[in-house]
Amino acid sequence: MFSLARKVALVTGAGSGIGAAIAQTFGRAGAFVLVTDREERTGRETLARIQTEGGQGEFVLLDVTRLEDCERAVQRVLAGGRPLDVLVNNAGVGHVGTILQTAGQDLDRLYAVNVRGVFNVTKAFLPSMLQRKSGVILNLASIGGVVGIRDRLAYCASKFAVVGLTKAMALDHAADGIRVNCICPGRVETPFVAARLKEYPDPQRAYQEMAATQAVGRMGKPEEIAAAALYLASDEAAFITGTAFLIDGGWSAGK
């Protein structure tokens, strides 16, 4: 396993799904994990699982859409004497619909979390990384940030923006010792996806159709995305920056 021993990592949206899997994987790899979420109950549940497995961490209540929340989180982290080594911008939301089925407020909501959230958290924590000339930033984008997906207009727009932010920041700060990458998963079995499936008339058929999008014929698992995050956060990935790391079961191979 790649090691994050003696590293401090912060994961947004770590209360469930991919964020929780990344937080737990980082804990197993030796990191002190700052588990953040806007839902205290789920965030503390993730922290409890990390601690049960012998890991260390702390819960920080955080709404990524509020810059003042992000700035308070920075002060709390630095006051604890643990400068941040790894930042994972995972918090995100989705929306189903074409442009005609998407209201302006739907687009605003997705941009507030998926794009402005990445901007807010990174803007708050980057100065402390620059002072130390060291740091890793991982943004969770999507296959929908690399190729178009039907009925996902607002989601694709927001995730293409995350890929753009990643590449721009990587170029801006490579000489400062900061690596910036994003992970672009295909469809993954998360509580969010499970909730969306229940909205279909035939959830089982909808699941099969979503799974068939991937060449391997199944959805990914949060732990598989977390394994890639661990690699990209580790020192073994020191030569990787500015990349959109696809983990999509072959979805994009034919595009």
Image (cartoon, rainbow, N blue to C red):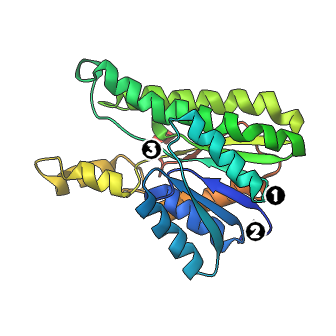
Image quarter (top left, top right, bottom left or bottom right) of the N terminus: bottom right
Q: Is residue 133 visible?
A: no
Q: Amino acid at mark 2?
A: Ser
Q: Residue at left 23%, top 51%?
A: 197
CA–CA distance between discs 2 and 1?
A: 8 Å
* Residue 231, placed above or below residue 151: below
Q: Which residue is mark 2?
A: 3
| Sooner in the amino-acid sequence: mark 2 or mark 1 | 2
Q: Secondary structure at mark 3?
A: helix
* Residue 152, placed above or below residue 79: above
Q: Which residue is mark 1?
A: 235
Q: Secondary structure at mark 2?
A: loop
Q: Secondary structure at mark 1?
A: helix
| Sooner in the amino-acid sequence: mark 3 or mark 2 | 2
Q: Is residue 8 left or right of residue 150?
A: right
Q: Nearer the viewer, residue 61 or 230?
A: 61
* Residue 107, position as x, y percentages in the image: 37, 24
Residue 219 placement: quadrant: bottom left
Residue 157 placement: quadrant: top left
Crowding around mark 1 (Cα neighbors within 10 Å: few <14, some 14 to 19, many 20+) is some
Q: Amino acid at mark 3?
A: Trp
Crowding around mark 3 (Cα neighbors within 10 Å: few <14, some 14 to 19, many 20+) is many
| Total tally of numbered discs in the picture | 3
CA–CA distance between discs 3 and 2?
A: 30 Å
Q: Which residue is mark 3?
A: 251
